[in-house]
Structure formats: C-alpha cells, structure tokens
C-alpha cells in the first residue's frame, strides 16, 4: 500500500504531513530526564538531544523540535542515528511522554467517547513543557524556531497543537496521523476532523494558499529511521524562516477558553462544539459558535467574552458596528479601549460581525452572505449558477468603486465571469450586489469521506488602492440518484428519534432518516427544521479513528402539514483491512404529516 506524505507552505509557516512506514529499534545515545508537571501533579519524563555545538558554543541559542510518539509509545525514540541528525542540524530535539498515567498504552486522552478519561489536557501540558525547555536550556523562543513532528496518534497531536497554537509553532509534521478524533474533557469532548481545521494554520479560512506537495513511501503503519530522518531534515531545514504574524486570520477552538494571536476568549460553553473568530483584523472580526465543523449550527445560550490584542490606542473611544446575521440587524455603539490598548467585546453564540473603527478610518469590506440563484446557499450541480454577494463595509469611511474577483482551487468548478464591477459602499452599508459570478460545479460528490464543499476565495479591490480577502464554502446539491428506500425513526426504535412512533415525520417530532438500514447525514436549508444534532458510529469497531455521522433533526411545531422538505444526504460504510471509507450520496424529499 502507498502512503503519501505532504507538506504545506503558508504565511504562518509550514505544515508537513508525512506517512512513514517500517519499524526499527537500533540502540542510540540520549539524555533521559524529567521535570515536575503542575498540570499533571507529578513527574513527567522526556528525552532530550542536544547538539555537540550546544556545548562547544556556550553563548549560542538553538531552535527546538518536539517529537510526539504514537499509540503504545513513550518518550524513548526506538531507533539510533538521531544524535547525528541533531548534530548536523544544530537543533535541540525533545521527545515527550504522551501518557496521561504511566500505565496507559493509549496516549493523549483522545479517541472515541470511551477513550476520553482524564480532565487533564495535553494542550495545557504542551505549554508547560515548552516553558520548561525554554527556561532550562538555551533555546530560541520565537515561534519561527519551534517545530513539531508526530507519528500516528502523535501525528494527530502535531497538527492539533500547531493549529491550537499557531502563534507558538511554525512547522508541523504529521506522520500517518489519524484523520479525526474526539478531544477535550470527559464531560465535554468534540469531534476534531483535520480536513476542516487547516484554517487555524495560516490565518485564512480555506487551505488553498498552502503550498501542497507529496511523496509516497510503501509499507505498513510503523515508523522507521529513514523516514523520521526525512521529516526531521525537512523541519530542521525550514525552521527559522516563518513569516511575520498575520494581518488577517481565522481560528476555531473546541475549548471554552483559549488564547490565540494575543486575543483571549472566555465563554460559558458546556456542550461539545467550537468557538470561531473569523476575518480578524484590527478593523474587526466575526464571532460565533458551531456545534461541529465546518457547517454546524450555532450553540444556543452561549456567552462569549473576547479581549482583543493590544493594537488600539489606550483609553481611546471607538465606534463598534455590529451586524447580527441571524436577526439581520445593524447597530452601533461606542466603546473605550483599556489602558493597554485592548477592547473587550461581549456577544452570544450566534454569528455577529463586528467593525472596530474611528471616524474616517479606512473602509473595510467583508462578506456578510451569498446566495447561488435561489434563496438558499446550495450550488446547482452541473448547471450554471449566479452567485451574488452581500457585502458590508465595517470600516469608518466610504470605499472607492469596487472590483470583486472570485476564484477556487476545487477541481471541476469553472467560473466563466470571475470579476465583477461594483459601486462604492459607504461606511456601515450592507448591500446585495446587482452583478453576479457565473459558476458551474461539475465535480462528482466525494466517495471517500473528503469534504464535499467548494472552497471559494474572494478578492475585493477599490479604486483608492484598498484590497480585502474573503473566503466562503458552498455545497453543490449534487445531481445523484434518489434514495428510494426511506425510513423514518420518530421514536419507534426508542433509541434515536422521539415522537409517536408511526414512522411519519410530523410537526414537533425529532427524527432520524434511513436509506435501507443506513442512517443518513443530511444537508438542507428549510425554515421548518429547527435543530440538528449528529450521531456518530464506529464502523467497524477495529477502526477507532474514523466516524460515520448521521443527522437527528427536529421538525418545527408550527410546520404546516403537507410541507415538503428536500434533502441532499449521504451514508458511510468503512472497510477495516483497506482502511477505506465508502460514501454513498443521494437526494430525497419528505412530506410532513404524510
């Protein structure tokens, strides 16, 4: 079997995915030591390799590479040759111990629901270990000089931690990492799917700007020295070259409190889900919650407290423009920065765009919404669609006349009219464009579990020399076969749905919809579906890092009988020996009350 490795380049640094192969256990020299961890409340071991130049040049400081082991591993790298790599690269290598307790074979407190057993989180221990290494050894402490390599479950953690702390890590290597795991605390853990989280690495919502390439190694899942060497040399050769912090970024976090790029977020979030900050610049941001990535609904009852970076004039007064997407309402208020130049903003979990501006500050155009020729956001499949934009000027002055250009790296999607001319937008104005982009989505629905969304990049320029970048996803309503063997669980199973159990979708009921015996994941836009939750399955149990998702939806109590709801849907079946995901797509409609 061929397992590829990939690397990505971005304005935040570089992310490299390596799929490595065979196992080796040659003896080697190292320094095994430990430190007291306040996070774990006890001693944690680690292995450290110092280059010969560390002792020969006592005034020199060194980059640091951290290595994260896989399942049943620990901090003891299982092969020789590492000291020579470290000497040649003149870097420090630290291999941590990812066991929550010493007797655990399974590391990092991640996996399926039954694997989340500890309140202690490795995202906290990573910060503690970095602080310990930086305070105990002569290290270069900026993010440009800190990289990660992880194998298998450690590969998942390598991307997870690099995405959680982009301000601390410049380069991340994922060797055969799991595609998705649940992560968090026992009482509140959330599905983290790597394919939807690249937004965290580069400060943009989509990944197309990452420079992607790959090679292939043939072999099984284990790690051997030669392929570790390749990963190590890539990181060591790239370290220290990271671009400066981004002027615009996005971040999604599954924890109720987090810090990123000097922004601090606190919340009362107690259920699984994410907090997102999108399109963050000095001129504002969008804040919201999502029950899941990338398109989950907002989480009701959530309060967010956001403290910005200290980028504003201390004690100065700013005008805050606030656009509530759910209420479709604009409002203005004033707020005063604190003595450090931070602004404190409180909001709920529904999506809100904030503009932070002064009188006559520069215009800033952001995307508030779009449609694809109908009232919903679905793209027609294999037929031309007219995409219109709803733009908001959250800045403090009027823009010049605008040129908007749409692009995508999604294969088989064509844009016959990629640029449109738009009038100027005044400060605080919210407006739909009259002109539209002509887009045709010809791609087939993914049969392997990859993202079905089309990723669009939008560049907007005005005649005054301003430029803004935006991104958005659109889902084609795929022209696929109709699911004809539909079954509705409205409580008859006594497991999933809830209702009168007559297998008919009726107002007020919570239902799960089947195709044959397969629970389906649903995609829809209908005002009479008032909530959706996801059910996850392991199929088969042996494959513990790939989850089949299905939808539980609730029909509104005021839904009129006879109302027709149309769905795009899919279901997933996995193969154990080939580690393959088989996804089948279909469409269907149900009539409420019939």
Image: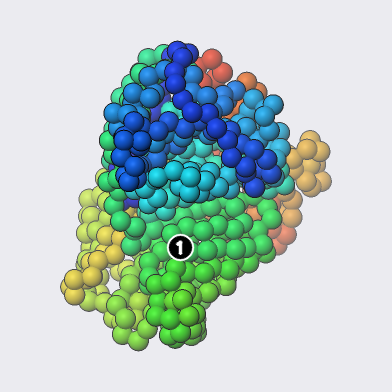
Task: Please tell me in which quadrant of the rendered image residue 368 appears.
Answer: bottom left
Dividing the picture into quadrants, the one containing residue 279 is: bottom left
Q: Position of residue 474 (x, y in %)?
A: 41, 50
Q: Is residue 524 above or below residue 20?
A: below
The coloring applied to the image is rainbow
Q: Residue at x 44, y 18 (%)?
A: 28
Give residue 588's position: percent from left, percent from top: 56, 40
Figure check: 379 above or below 81: below
Does 250 appear above or below 86?
below
Q: Residues within 10 Å of mark 1 (few under 14, many from 20)?
A: some
Of 427 and 475, the residue lying toward us: 427
- Left or right of residue 565: residue 245: left
| Element carrying mark 1 | loop
Side (left or right) of 462 relative to 75? left
Q: Is residue 340 left or right of residue 231?
A: right
**Lateral position of residue 458 relative to residue 421, left or right:** right
* Residue, disc 1: 262
Residue placed most toward the observer, 331 or 15? 15
592 or 454, which lies in front? 454
């Amino acid at each position: 079997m061929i397992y590829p490795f990939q690397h990505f380049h971005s304005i935040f640094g570089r992310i490299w995915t390596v799929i490595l192969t065979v196992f080796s256990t040659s003896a080697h020299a190292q320094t095994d030591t430990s430190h007291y961890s306040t996070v774990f409340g006890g001693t944690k071991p680690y292995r450290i390799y110092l280059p010969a130049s560390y002792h020969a040049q006592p005034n020199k400081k060194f980059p640091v590479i951290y290595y994260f082991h896989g399942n049943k591993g620990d901090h003891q790298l299982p092969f020789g040759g590492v000291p020579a790599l470290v000497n040649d690269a003149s870097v420090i290598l630290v291999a941590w111990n990812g066991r929550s307790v010493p007797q655990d074979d399974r590391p990092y407190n991640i996996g399926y629901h039954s694997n989340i057993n500890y309140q202690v989180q490795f995202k906290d221990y990573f910060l503690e270990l970095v602080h310990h290494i930086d305070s105990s050894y002569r290290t270069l402490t900026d993010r440009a000089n800190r990289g990660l390599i992880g194998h298998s479950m450690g590969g998942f953690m390598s991307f997870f931690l690099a995405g959680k702390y982009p301000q601390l890590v410049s380069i991340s290597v994922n060797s055969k990492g799991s595609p998705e795991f649940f992560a968090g605390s026992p009482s509140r853990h959330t599905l983290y799917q790597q394919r939807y989280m690249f937004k965290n690495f580069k400060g943009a919502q989509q990944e197309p700007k990452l420079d992607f390439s790959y090679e292939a190694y043939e072999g099984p899942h284990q790690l051997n020295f030669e392929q570790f060497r390749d990963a190590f040399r890539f990181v060591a050769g790239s370290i220290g070259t990271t671009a400066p912090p981004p002027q615009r970024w996005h971040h999604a976090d599954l924890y109720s409190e987090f810090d990123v790029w000097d922004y601090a977020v606190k919340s009362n979030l107690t259920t699984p889900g994410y907090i997102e900050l999108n399109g963050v610049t000095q001129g504002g941001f969008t804040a919201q919650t999502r029950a899941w990535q990338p398109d989950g609904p907002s989480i009701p009852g959530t309060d967010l407290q956001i403290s910005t970076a200290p980028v504003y004039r201390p004690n100065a007064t700013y005008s805050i423009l606030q656009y509530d997407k759910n209420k479709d309402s604009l409002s203005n208020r004033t707020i005063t920065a604190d003595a450090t130049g931070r602004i404190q903003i409180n909001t709920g979990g529904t999506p809100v765009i904030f503009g932070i501006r002064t009188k006559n500050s520069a215009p800033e155009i952001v995307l508030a919404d779009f449609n694809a020729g109908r009232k919903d956001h679905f793209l027609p499949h294999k037929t031309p669609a007219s995409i219109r934009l709803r733009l908001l000027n959250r800045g403090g002055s009027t823009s010049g006349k605008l040129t908007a250009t749409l692009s995508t790296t999604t294969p088989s999607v064509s844009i016959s009219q990629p640029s449109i001319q738009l009038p100027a937008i005044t400060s605080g104005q919210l407006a739909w464009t009259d002109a539209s982009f002509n887009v045709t989505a010809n791609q087939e629905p993914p049969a392997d579990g990859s993202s079905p969304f089309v990723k669009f990049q939008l560049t907007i320029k005005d005649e005054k020399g301003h430029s803004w970048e935006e991104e958005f996803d659109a889902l084609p309503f795929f022209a696929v076969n109709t699911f004809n063997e539909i079954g509705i669980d409205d409580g008859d199973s006594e497991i999933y749905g809830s209702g009168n159990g007559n297998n008919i979708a009726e107002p007020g009921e919570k239902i799960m919809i089947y195709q044959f015996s397969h629970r389906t994941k649903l995609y829809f836009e209908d005002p009479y579906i008032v909530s959706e939750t996801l059910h996850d399955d392991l199929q088969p149990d042996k494959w513990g890092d790939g989850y089949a998702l299905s939808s539980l939806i609730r029909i509104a109590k005021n839904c009129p009988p006879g109302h027709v709801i149309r769905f795009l849907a899919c279901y997933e079946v996995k193969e154990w020996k080939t580690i393959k995901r088989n996804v089948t797509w279909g469409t269907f409609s149900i009539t409420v009350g019939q």
